[in-house]
Image: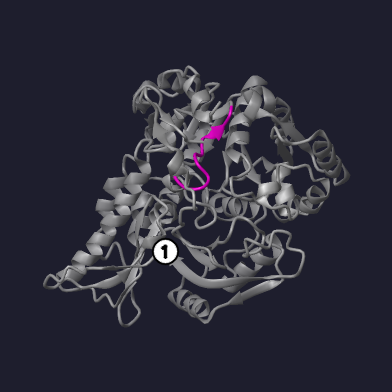
Amino acid sequence: MEDVEIARNTKLKNIYEIAKILEIPEEDVEPYGKYKAKISLKLMEKEKNKKDGKLILVTAINPTPLGEGKTTISIGLADGLRKIGKKSILALREPSLGPVFGIKGGATGGGHSQIAPMEDINLHFTGDIHAITSANNLLSALIDNHMYFGNELGFDRITWKRCVDLNDRQLRKVETGLSGEKKIVPREDGFDISVASEIMAIFCLATDIKDLKRRIGNIIVGYTKENKPITARDLKADGALTVLLKDAMNPNLVQTLEHTPAIVHGGPFANIAHGCNSIIATKMALKLGEYVVTEAGFGADLGAEKFLDIKCRKAQIKPDAVVCVATIKALKYNGGVPKEEIKNENVDALKKGFKNLLKHVDNLRNVYGLNVVVGINKYNHDTPKEIECLEELLRENNIEFSLVESWEKGGEGATNLAEKIVKISEKETILNYAYQLDDSIENKILDIATKIYGARGVQYTENAQEKIKEIEKLGYSNFSICIAKTQYSLSDDPKNLECAKPYDIHVEDVILKTGAEFVVVITGKIMTMPGLPKVPAAEQIDLDENGNIVGIF
């Protein structure tokens, strides 16, 4: 049965009933139909003196192209915690239309561990990403309008890009203003995917509406001939953009198929952005639940690193426990097995790929100082011999683990993991960061490359080195680092899965994000506007004869 059919055949509770589980007053719930709602930011003020719950981070090893089920495990764990009597809540990212119609498909979990209504969440949901896209493109329109009416601020180069929430490689670089009308200035422009937009990053890192407006005003959109930055505030754009985002800033409330409450809000990619849901949603969840299960995108080298070094540092929070999701298919993939053969039994490749899991666990334990449980996400094609081999390797390396069957069994398949998480989350943790903010930009990049990726060093293009000098000259060298890198390898080469030989990280470009307050470091051949695969998921999505959506997986 398809995920969409499982979700459709499950009776959901009215969203007011879900809000009641969390003791949210009705006046703070704004329904969007029967099964989804927005929660008023006023609730944060009411709950400010309440003690925070435990924060559980779900991350993973380097994935196969279709992912390893972090969201499925996150949902299963939250349901499992409820089954053992704990008041749990999810804090997850919103799916982007890019992957939904691209290679990965939907991002609402799978099997019997899903959040719902899955079709709504995977498609337009409550319109948050559309609002972010509109705000981003309003800023572009204001820039070009300013140019049309005389360029009073003296733009010499424009650095701001347009965006759209789809994978469309044709838009990476475009020419605009080609109508030939008087005073229109033709120029080279480009599009990012909306989830890589600085507006999305600001949306997820802002602590309230006031902070949102401040950050939007700080966005550098271009430079004068004298290399003086021009900001969104200079264009008087910060107020209008904040208005467009006002309603979107209220977190979204939905439920799992087992009626566990889930706050789903914000959705930056982790390979080209910072990969975490909003600070507002996470902090709200911490006031509403005993255990908050959240996730960070892709492998721990990307998602967990940015969750810890950017989000936790900004929000002054730390996880009480971490689940590192591993699948036998991903271990074999990282051990050199082609994706077409990963369903075939191969214990030798599993053993080779195990070092990828070891590296991630070592980072979480020894770089960041966190308590870790490996969640083995069980697939139907995993053989008893492979499962036994993996469990033995984990025991030999003194790594706590749990075999998770939440895809097939829902929360019941994750109760063992839930019990282990409750136990280890009682241990004291002191979150260490991979780098210090007051270090130089190059030293911070080197720290991430060597400590987290296991690289030998970092190589820079001349363009990247010049950009770093400009950023330091402008006084922004104390910003966090957000590395854009392939998700498929610890290195910046998606084909170098085993990372058997010493390698360097290659920095191609550096982009200053003054609103997000981080520096984006582009490595390898990563693109901020992805393309579609040869056979996109969009080809399978349709309406059946009854008007039901089919094909989202």
Is residue 48 visible in the rendered structure shown here? no
Q: Based on the displayed image, in which of its 4 quarters is residue 490 positioned?
A: bottom right
- Check if residue 547 falls in the magenta segment: no
Residue drawn at point x = 24 percent, y = 52 percent: 240
519 and 12: which is toward the camera: 12
Q: Based on the displayed image, in which of its 4 quarters is residue 127 positioned?
A: top left
Q: Quadrant of the N terminus?
A: top right
Is residue 257 visible in the rendered structure shown here? yes
Q: Which residue is mark 1?
A: 514
Looking at the rendering, the stretch of residues picked out in magenta corresponds to 101-111
Q: Secondary structure at mark 1?
A: loop
| 347 in relation to 258, above or below | below
| 228 in relation to 387, above or below | below
Q: From the viewer's perspective, tell me whether residue 291 is left or right of residue 226.
A: right
Pinpoint residue 171: horizontal percent, then vertical percent: 36, 61
Pinpoint residue 463: horizontal percent, then vertical percent: 49, 79
364 and 129: which is toward the camera: 129
| 299 in relation to 543, above or below | below
Q: Residues within 10 Å of mark 1 (few under 14, many from 20)?
A: many
Magenta span main SS: loop
Q: From the viewer's perspective, tell me whether residue 269 is left or right of residue 229.
A: right
Q: Amino acid at mark 1?
A: Thr
Residue drawn at point x = 71 percent, y = 38 percent: 375
Pinpoint residue 331: horizontal percent, then vertical percent: 73, 48
Q: Based on the displayed image, in which of its 4 quarters is residue 176 positioned?
A: bottom left
Residue drawn at point x = 46 percent, y = 19 percent: 12
Pinpoint residue 394: horizontal percent, then vertical percent: 82, 43
